[in-house]
Amino acid sequence: MTLFRILRPARRLWLVAVVGAGVFLPTMAGAADPPAVVPVADGLAPVLAAAMAGTKVPAMGMLVIRDGRVVAQAERGLRRNDGNSAVGHRDDWHIGSNGKALTVAMVARLADRGVLSWTRRLDAMLPALAGTMNPQYRGVTLVQLLSHHSGLPHDIVDEAVLKQMLVPSGKSTVRADREAYIARALRDAPVGPTSDFNYSNTGLLIAAVIAEHATGKPYEQLVRQEVFQPLRMQHVGFGQPPAGQPRGHVAGKPIGQVGENPDFVAPAGNMYMPLSDWALFCIDQLRGAKGQGRLLKPESYRLMQTAQPGGGGLGWGVQPSVAGRQGPVLVHVGSDGSWYAIVALFPDSGNGLLIAANAGEDMGGDAAGRAAFKPIVDTLAPPVR
């Protein structure tokens, strides 16, 4: 299984699970303190049990945010289906393409300081590639790359080339592999004009390379420095969770320590974290919608959370409603093929929901995610008017 197969969505990724199924002002103890987690809520446990019934999903986790605070968290099931170790509050979950919003936040931090420009042309940001990239891409901006309005295909089009590039030789660095990938991807013909929405992992990888060129630092260091550390997200990693943590599952079995996706695709969504760490980022996004975020300037939150012409925010799906509930709502779905994760945030109320499963679609991860989503989201926002 390749990146091409496990990350290419049939529809807009954030719509697959939440809409296709029917998809703040926190009172924290201190601005930099993690939100307190209420003990497992009796109300969540039966929701997870019902969602997993009839599937082969080994475990699920769910976290609820109300008025900018974590008010409930629950987990159910096993870290791996060939063992007997139960999942817990601080366990790691791979969040797939939900990590794109964290990459956008890293870029926004650099733009806020003038290190990057939202409007500078791609041929000026990556001049060494200007001569070989498709002419349409030369004038593309960071806003277009991060909102899927560049015209870039989802991945490299030639599957033989794609498979070859997704198996790093081990003779170069992650950063060099990432740069080689985007250099080849920029030669592909566009799949549409820049006015159209076309979901693209490549766009996020290009934005990461631009940030690396501007700072001289690798993406992995930048996102830790600009996002994880300021928000005290202390348990985030790239690739698959370490030994002893939950494993993703596909074809009825837990995957190995090395997942299907190479390390260089991290900016497009290849990171793991506990639900409580993910919640720190989501709460900051909710605070930012109220002008109280601590990570970005107010205008950067607005840019991330505003739908561009043609649809889509930067790192978020921005929708007027979801599953029959009134928005606006920020939504996304992520999967690397062996995990499944959903997020929905309601900026007006400061409410939100995070769901993760350690199994892909072939074992019912998507179905279980949708089943768990509906009964909880119904308590977070009023019906569509």
Image (cartoon, rainbow, N blue to C red):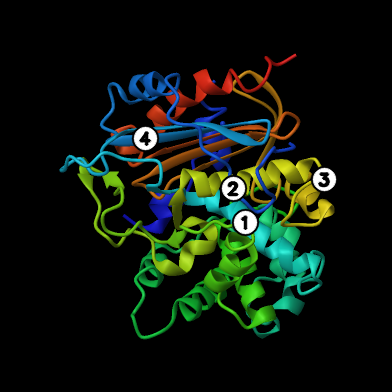
Q: Which quarter of the rendered picture does the N terminus lie within?
A: bottom left
Label ID, residue 291: 3
Mark 3–mark 1 Cα distance, whole angstroms, equals: 16 Å
Mark 3–mark 4 Cα distance, whole angstroms, equals: 33 Å
Q: Is residue 322 above or below residue 356?
A: above
Q: In this view, does 165 lie above or below 2?
A: below
Mark 2–mark 1 Cα distance, whole angstroms, equals: 6 Å
**Rendered residue at 17%/39% (across/down):** 84
Mark 2–mark 4 Cα distance, whole angstroms, equals: 19 Å
The residue that mark 4 highlights is 60
- Rendering coords of residue 311 (x, y %): 72, 41
Q: Are marks 3 and 4 in contact (CB under 8 Å)?
A: no
The residue that mark 1 highlights is 231
The residue that mark 2 highlights is 280
Secondary structure type for disc 2: helix
Q: Nearer the viewer, residue 269 or 376?
A: 376
Badge 2: residue crowd in 10 Å (few <14, some 14–19, many ≥20): many
Residue farthest to the front?
29
**Left or right: where does residue 40 sit relative to residue 220?**
left
Of the numbered discs 3 and 4, the one sitting upstream in the chain is: 4
> Can residue 188 be seen from the camera position used here?
no
Secondary structure type for disc 4: strand
Badge 4: residue crowd in 10 Å (few <14, some 14–19, many ≥20): many
Secondary structure type for disc 1: loop
Secondary structure type for disc 3: loop
